[in-house]
Image: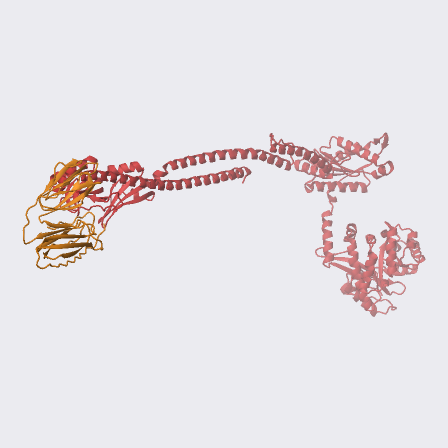
């Protein structure tokens, strides 16, 4: 079994924007090997205010026996629809504790969306296609972002203090959540993560 | 070794060698085949074995996958519903006959188990993941649990991410091993090495059977970790592998043994078939060698041996014919068909041996004057006469055994008589048989047979001896002019004596046993000593001193006389030369026998001796008897001429007794004559004899010869001879023959006395036995 050295190298530079109501935060994630990292979930939990509940909607499609997208972040209480774009039937299940459910084999649109009302990581699978895996991060905070293939994402949120969590399914040795302060000015947070972990391991969801 | 045995043994050894080589080759090939075959089977077995294990593994993998993919199972795993999990494990294990099913966490902690010693919470030794497997989520290997070996496959359980391992295993128990053995055709042993060492967990053969010498094995390592090692040993007993080959080898051995025995019989039969006739032929040849030619060879064959036998048979008859011819030639007289001497003597010998008791008589018959028949009537008539006489003799009934012709005119017969007195009668009957004239072509021819008879006595046991006795009797009959004489014991010939005499005489010459004696010769007119006659004596080692009469006649008969003469001449001439050098002019007279004159080289011998010893020839006189030149006067004359030419004096000995004619005498180169002693003796006894002596002396003088008289014993005779004109005298009156030393003494005595002095007595006592007293 191949082993990868665990090395964490996270550099966080925080720029504070003085005297503004809202600030723009840019995260720039690269891997330790210098590649822009996609599908990195970054969550900012406000420490000074409690955001109101939300009842949004989201969709996770199944294309070519793959979940699309593979990584999804939603607010707690979001109803996610699982359309099936393949010609074959799929089953969707989750044995994850926060949101356990099963969608029996179906084709086309599912009868009902699945409500994700507990925060935490949900791993989705298909009982008849073992290789199909999708991750759904369920968070209370409305401030979160998932990096595109460019590795850079922008987020605007009110100034204040936040707890920043970073997650990627394959990350090794993730840095613990930490506090940042958002001012009215734009700020860029560069992140470096180690993605050379074992393919079967799933990084723990930072609570 | 006999031919038969040799042939048989040779071929047997040859066959045995061939068979041994063949058997060796077969055995060696078998042995190699067995080993190669075992190797091939083991290799094939290994392949089958690993295929079987692979098949098991695939089966287990499929089963484990099936369980791992079961949604309910995944649910149970994710909800950690232990009871449900155990039941699922039991159920799936039973479904494929897996002995062990274990569910572990990804770290190997046992979550649930069925059919194993492991308990939840324990660490389970998951087999290593097989990177080469199609999907990376299964692992396989072998483990030992509670002393049992399991082939194990582990598969990850995903929900959907990997959350656990499900491991399923077949136990490699006795049944499984038997199945493996059945498929591979080999013995299978599974061994485990633990801290305590190797243990054969399960095996299809008895313990340690795989560690024997005649077992070939292949070892398959199933699993190896730090402290545990699991191996499968495939083995094949060479003995079992050899079994079919061994039965083949046994069959070959049996064939070899049978063929050897059969071949032995055949070889001996064949060899005997060849050698038996050979032995028969050998026996036949042996019989022929022993002189028997009428044997039957007894070999009736059509092959080469038959031809050989036929040839031998022909040879046998040819040899027989030739043998008979040779026998006839050897033992028969060709003219008369009677036995020859050889056969007769042999036959007589047999008769003497056979009839020891009955007296055997032998007659030797000589036909008187038979030579005249041949000469006057021709040899054909003579032969016819001989044949007739042979027939007559053979017809005499008393001639019991044999009649033979011994020589030209001599026959012999012998008979076994009833008693000794009838010998004479038997001889007479033979004479009677020959008394009638023999008719040859109507011409009557008188036969005058003389017969010598001898009868076997204990002293004449040999046939030869008896024949000689008869010969002597025949001699006597002839001498006494009788028709028949019987051998008498007194007549026993001295032949053996004489034979030894010759040897002794030769010995005498070589060992100086002969002595020269000298008898002086006196000139009657002057009484001067003119010389001496050399006489021979033999100092015999046992018989003492022998006179000439005792060995000279014998030497003349045997021809030994020439050697004696040569010896005497040598010594006499040597002595004469010695005297000559001493200034004594003495003529030495040496007697030459008639036989000596037959020696063509006599003159050169004499000349040689004279030269060697430096003696003037006139000092040597050779005395020759008249008989010496009667036989071959011409030849004698030639030699005497040659000798006279040397200057040697020649004297006729015993003059007046011989038959020589006066013409001969006149031609002979002699210088003197020696009147025979009978004249001198006659002169003394009978005065009437004087004219005869005078005539002889006058005749000598008339021929111009000196006259010598010998044997003079009285003074009166000497005086009378001198009156008659005799020149020289010799006799006991003067001196006996005496050895050299005595003669020299005698001469010395004579010299002291003046030659013309009146003779006086002159005794020489020392020589009394050899020298008569001289009266001068």
The colour assigned to chain B within the rendered structure: red
Q: Which of these two is toward me, B555 or B230?
A: B230
Above-or-below relation of B760 to B179? below
Q: Nearer the viewer, residue B46 or B410?
A: B46
Chain A visual colour? orange
- The quadrant where residue B699 appears: bottom right
Left or right relative to A93: residue B396: right
Look at the image and tell me whether residue B356 can be seen: no
Residue A144 in view in this figure: yes
Q: Position of residue B287 (x, y in %)?
A: 62, 35
Where is residue B624, by image quadrant? bottom right
Residue A204 to residue B647: above or below: above
Q: How is the image coloured?
A: by chain
Decide if residue B707 is on the left or right side of residue B282.
right
Residue at horizontal 29%, vertical 36%?
B182
Q: Residue furthest front?
A: A20
How many labels were placed on the picture? 0
Q: Is residue B145 left or right of residue B30?
A: left
């Amino acid at each position: 079994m191949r082993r990868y050295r665990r090395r964490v190298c996270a550099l966080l530079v925080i720029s504070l924007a003085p005297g503004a109501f809202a600030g723009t935060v840019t995260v720039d994630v690269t891997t330790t090997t210098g590649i822009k990292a996609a599908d990195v979930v970054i969550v900012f939990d406000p420490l000074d205010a409690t955001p109101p509940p939300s009842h949004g909607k989201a969709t996770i499609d199944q294309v070519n026996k793959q979940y699309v997208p593979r990584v999804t972040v939603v607010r707690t209480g979001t109803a996610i629809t699982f359309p099936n774009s393949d010609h074959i039937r799929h089953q969707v299940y989750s044995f994850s504790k926060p949101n356990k459910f099963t969608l029996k084999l179906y084709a086309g649109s599912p009868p009902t969306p699945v409500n994700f009302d507990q925060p935490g990581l949900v791993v989705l699978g298909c009982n008849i296609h073992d290789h199909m895996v999708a991750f759904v991060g369920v968070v209370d905070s409305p401030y979160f972002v998932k990096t595109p293939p460019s590795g850079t994402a922008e987020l605007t949120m009110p100034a204040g203090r936040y707890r920043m969590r970073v997650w990627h399914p394959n990350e090794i040795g993730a840095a613990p959540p930490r506090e940042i302060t958002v001012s009215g000015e734009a700020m860029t947070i560069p992140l470096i993560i180690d993605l050379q972990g074992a393919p079967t391991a799933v990084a723990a969801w930072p609570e | 070794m006999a031919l038969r045995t040799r042939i048989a043994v040779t071929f047997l050894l040859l066959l045995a060698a061939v068979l041994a080589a063949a058997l060796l080759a077969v055995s060696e090939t078998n042995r190699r085949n067995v080993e190669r075959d075992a190797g091939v089977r083991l290799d094939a077995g290994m392949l089958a074995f690993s295929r079987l294990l692979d098949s098991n593994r695939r089966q287990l993998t499929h089963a484990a996958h099936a369980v791992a993919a079961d949604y309910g199972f995944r649910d149970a795993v994710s909800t950690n519903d232990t009871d449900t999990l155990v039941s699922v494990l039991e159920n799936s294990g039973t479904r494929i006959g897996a002995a062990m099913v274990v569910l572990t966490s990804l770290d190997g902690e046992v979550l649930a188990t069925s059919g194993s010693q492991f308990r939840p919470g324990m660490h389970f030794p998951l087999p290593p993941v097989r990177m080469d497997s199609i999907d990376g989520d299964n692992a396989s290997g072998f483990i030992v649990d509670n002393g049992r070996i399991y082939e194990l496959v582990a598969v990850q359980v995903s929900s959907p991410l990997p959350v656990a391992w499900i491991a399923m295993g077949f136990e490699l128990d006795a049944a499984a091993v038997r199945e493996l053995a059945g498929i591979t055709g080999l013995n299978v042993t599974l061994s485990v090495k633990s801290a305590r060492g190797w243990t054969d967990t399960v095996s299809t053969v008895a313990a340690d059977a795989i560690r024997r010498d005649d077992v070939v094995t292949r070892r398959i390592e199933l699993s190896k970790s730090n402290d545990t090692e699991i191996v499968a040993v495939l083995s094949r007993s060479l003995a079992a592998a050899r079994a079919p080959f061994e039965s083949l080898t046994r069959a070959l051995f049996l064939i070899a043994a049978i063929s050897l025995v059969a071949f032995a019989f055949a070889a001996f039969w064949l060899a005997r078939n060849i050698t038996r006739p050979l032995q028969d032929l050998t026996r036949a040849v042996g019989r022929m060698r022993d002189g028997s030619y009428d044997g039957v060879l007894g070999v009736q064959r059509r092959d080469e041996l038959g031809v050989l036998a036929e040839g031998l048979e022909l040879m046998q008859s040819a040899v027989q014919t030739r043998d008979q011819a040779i026998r006839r030639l050897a033992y028969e007289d060709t003219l008369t068909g009677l036995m020859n001497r050889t056969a007769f003597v042999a036959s007589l010998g047999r008769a003497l041996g056979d009839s020891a008791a009955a007296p055997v008589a032998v007659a030797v018959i000589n036909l008187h004057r038979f030579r005249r028949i041949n000469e006057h009537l021709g040899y054909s008539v003579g032969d016819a006469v001989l044949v007739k006489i042979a027939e007559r003799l053979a017809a005499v009934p008393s001639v019991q055994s044999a009649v033979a012709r011994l020589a030209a005119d001599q026959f012999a017969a012998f008979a076994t008589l009833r008693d000794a007195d009838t010998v004479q009668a038997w001889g007479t009957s033979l004479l009677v048989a020959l008394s009638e004239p023999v008719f040859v072509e109507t011409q009557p021819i008188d036969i005058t047979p003389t017969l010598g008879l001898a009868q076997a006595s204990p002293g004449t046991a040999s046939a030869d001896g008896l024949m000689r006795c008869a010969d002597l009797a025949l001699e006597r009959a002839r001498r006494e002019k009788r028709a028949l004489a019987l051998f008498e014991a007194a007549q026993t010939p001295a032949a053996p004596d004489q034979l030894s005499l010759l040897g002794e005489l030769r010995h005498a010459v070589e060992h100086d046993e002969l002595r020269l004696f000298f008898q002086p010769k006196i000139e009657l007119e002057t009484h001067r000593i003119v010389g001496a006659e050399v006489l021979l004596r033999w100092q015999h080692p046992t018989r003492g001193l022998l006179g000439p009469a005792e060995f000279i006649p014998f030497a003349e008969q045997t021809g030994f006389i020439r050697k004696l003469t040569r010896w005497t001449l040598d010594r006499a001439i040597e002595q004469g030369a010695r005297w000559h050098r001493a200034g004594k002019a003495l003529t030495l007279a040496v007697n030459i026998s008639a036989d000596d004159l037959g020696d063509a080289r006599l003159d050169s011998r004499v000349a040689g001796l004279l030269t060697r010893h430096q003696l003037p020839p006139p000092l040597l006189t050779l005395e020759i008897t008249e008989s010496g030149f009667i036989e071959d006067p011409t030849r004698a004359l030639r030699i005497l001429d040659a000798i006279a030419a040397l200057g040697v004096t020649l004297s006729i000995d015993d003059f007046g007794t011989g038959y020589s004619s006066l013409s001969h005498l006149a031609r002979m180169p002699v210088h003197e004559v020696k009147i025979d002693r009978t004249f001198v003796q006659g002169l003394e006894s009978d005065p009437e004899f004087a004219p005869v002596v005078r005539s002889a002396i006058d005749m000598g003088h008339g021929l111009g010869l000196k006259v010598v008289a010998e044997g003079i014993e009285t003074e009166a005779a000497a005086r009378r001879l001198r009156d008659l004109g005799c020149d020289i005298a010799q006799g006991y009156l003067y001196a006996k023959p005496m050895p050299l030393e005595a003669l020299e003494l005698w001469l010395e005595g004579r010299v002291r006395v003046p030659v013309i002095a009146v003779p006086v007595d002159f005794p020489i006592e020392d020589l009394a036995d050899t020298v008569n007293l001289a009266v001068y």
